[in-house]
Amino acid sequence: MVMRRVYFDNNATTPVLPQVFEAMRPYFTEHFGNASSIHHHGQETRAAVERARESVATLLGCRAPEVVFTGGGTEGDNLGVFGVLREDLKDGAHIITSTIEHSAVLNTCRQLETLGMAVTYVPVNASCLVDPDDVRRALRPNTQLISIMMANNETGVLQPVEEIGKIAAEADVYFHTDAVQAAGKVAIDVERIGCDLLTISGHKIHAPQGVGALYVRKGTQVTPRLFGGRHERSRRAGTENVPAIVGLGKSAEFAHAGFTNGEVALMSSLRDQLQSALLHEVDESVVNGAGAPRVPNTTNIRFEHIEGEALVIALDLKGLAVSTGAACSSGAIEPSHVLTAMGLRPDQARASIRFSLGKQSKPEDVDFALSLVPATVAKLRELSPVYAK
Ligand code: PLP
């Protein structure tokens, strides 16, 4: 018998939608042209790339020429952060970011520090929220960029990006936001946010891995990170990955439709059911970031007195895929930098599990999770020397 498997790790990656796959398929074989070629084959793929650009622009509320296709979210974040900095200014560059960014932004900022630039990492409160006043207070005369994410990948908490956008505009500082985990889950409108740069990634919205887009506001100069041909209006060199870009365009259309066809609403109600049933059935369980607005697919729950990694493995053996926010490096499990930034003790951070639902999630998937999680937590607690009932 085939084991039943339920996938609640959609913040890690999502399956490519069959319709997205079908849209991509002809661009591997039949329509194979290089989008820069001037003959028929090139014109065909160029037209497909430009249609995809329109679809992404519709999702983000921007104009098509403001969309730069990238090789994923990490590349978009790197281009967004590095791209606008003026290294030639004599008083150097200062950047403001937060302590809960994805490593694609955090490590980019650390790299900038090694190059002599100054970075302020603004903290978050216990609900995983950045205080816009902290951002305002961190401004310096030489601040060139604010990079604060729209939605956190571990807790799903939505940051006050519109307020931060206003602060950036008043200070005449560039504002980049990593919207990788927001796309398809909450509406994105670059005008309302007031950002100059915004990153999305294909594989979080049912397109393939290794493709993404960076919104670059008209008039904003970005220095490429990859040098070569004049692709993407000289902002990102390299022959376009046409099938992946077509997939991203199609997935953007589905992501946009999800706000009105009930898909996002269903995902949200399934998440809420899962979360409230778990809180009800498991003692000493707490939602990390519960006090803040969150994306509708994510709940990060701390089951006190357990090792999250052990719970993930035990659930996986029974067919449920979830994750911890912890990064496992060289055999040592580091507590999540996001949860510790919220003030959780390392043991509390390690006791936390992220459930992230997707468009393909069904009510019976929630039932399946509920049939496993409370009993597995109870079992792990029984085995735990530190847990006394
Ligand atoms: N930013 C956030 C918030 C993410 O969650 C991720 C992926 O987990 C990335 C950036 C990186 O995107 P990619 O995997 O496409 O490089």
Image (cartoon, rainbow, N blue to C red):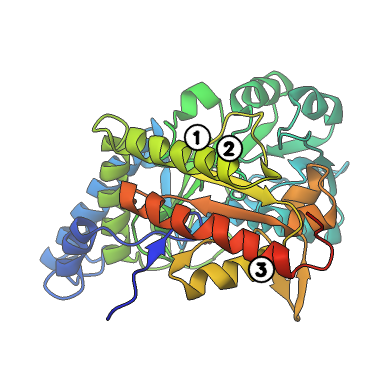
Query: Assess mark 1: CB under 8 A from ligand 1?
Result: no
Label 1 sits on a secondary structure element that is loop
Q: Which residue is mark 2?
A: 150
Which residue is denoted by mark 3 in the rendering? Answer: 309
Q: What secondary structure is marked by label 2?
A: loop
Up the image or down, 50 lies above or below 40; here it is above
Q: Report x, y in % for residue 318.
A: 46, 71
Q: Amino acid at mark 1?
A: Arg
For the residues labelled 1 and 2, the Cα–Cα distance comes to: 17 Å
- Name the N-terminal-most of marks 3 and 1: 1
Crowd class of label 3 (few under 14; some 14 to 19; many from 20; radius 10 Å): some
Which disc, if any, is residue 266?
none
Which of the two residues, 224 or 171, is positioned nearer the viewer here?
171
Q: Quadrant of ligand 1?
A: bottom right
The residue depicted at 66 percent of the width and 37 percent of the height is: 289
Decide which of 361, 385 is in the foreground and name it: 385
- In the picture, the disc for residue 217 is 1
Q: Name the amino acid, label 3.
A: Glu
Quarter of the image where the C terminus is located: bottom right
N-terminal-most mark, 1 or 2: 2
Q: CA distance from mark 3 to mark 2?
A: 27 Å
